[in-house]
Image: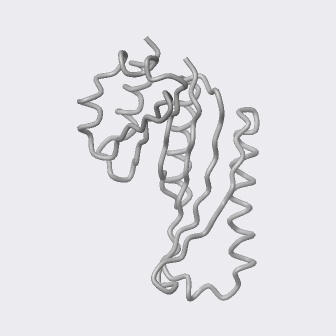
Amino acid sequence: MNADLHVELIREIPEPQKVSNWNDFLEGAESFMTALEARYEEEGLYFSAEMRLYSGMEAGDLIMASTLYEVELVKAKDLVLALDAWARENGFTLGEVSLEFRSEQDVVPRLNVPRLLAETGVKMEVEKGKVALVFTPGSMKDFSSLFTTVIEDLSK
């Protein structure tokens, strides 16, 4: 089974008002993206980046996001877990991770949906027959274990 995979990597900017040279900062962000894209070039992983600044520049986030279409589920799992490890090693956190499926019938019968949705940091969005499982790893106890279980259940 295949799904569209969307992954966000987030790096907090604790005091953006103290950034004296935004060009250097953005070049540093670009070097992170380039290194990560080179590492996963075979998978076709490319990132876009955005910065969000909050409360009059008292806080902010650098967000790198990528979407891969029609990815085989086991490959998606391996990639997400590798990105999670990379993020922790490089001062990022794994932001929202979503798997979008073409048909609700492909997903719902294979999962214990009420149990899954009872987990903190998991939601399911259904729109026009498509279903997306959306995970917020930062608010979960054991994202990697739950994500692995979901992939295994969907792969049966």
Q: In the image, what residue occupies the spot 62% across and 56% down?
A: 64
- Measured as percent of width and height from the top left, residue 6 is found at 57, 42
Q: Quadrant of residue 26?
A: bottom right
Q: In the image, what residue occupies the spot 70% across and 41% down?
A: 45
- Measured as percent of width and height from the top left, residue 25 is found at 68, 75
- How many callouts does the rendering have? 0
Q: Nearer the viewer, residue 88 or 3?
A: 3
- Measured as percent of width and height from the top left, residue 104 is found at 44, 23
- Measured as percent of width and height from the top left, residue 54 is found at 48, 78
Q: In the image, what residue occupies the spot 37% across and 21% down?
A: 108
Left or right: residue 102 versus residue 114 is right
Left or right: residue 17 versus residue 20 is left
Q: Specify the farthest residue to the top.
A: 156
Using the image, determine if residue 73 lies above or below residue 40.
above
Using the image, determine if residue 50 lies above or below residue 44.
below
Q: Nearer the viewer, residue 131 or 31?
A: 131
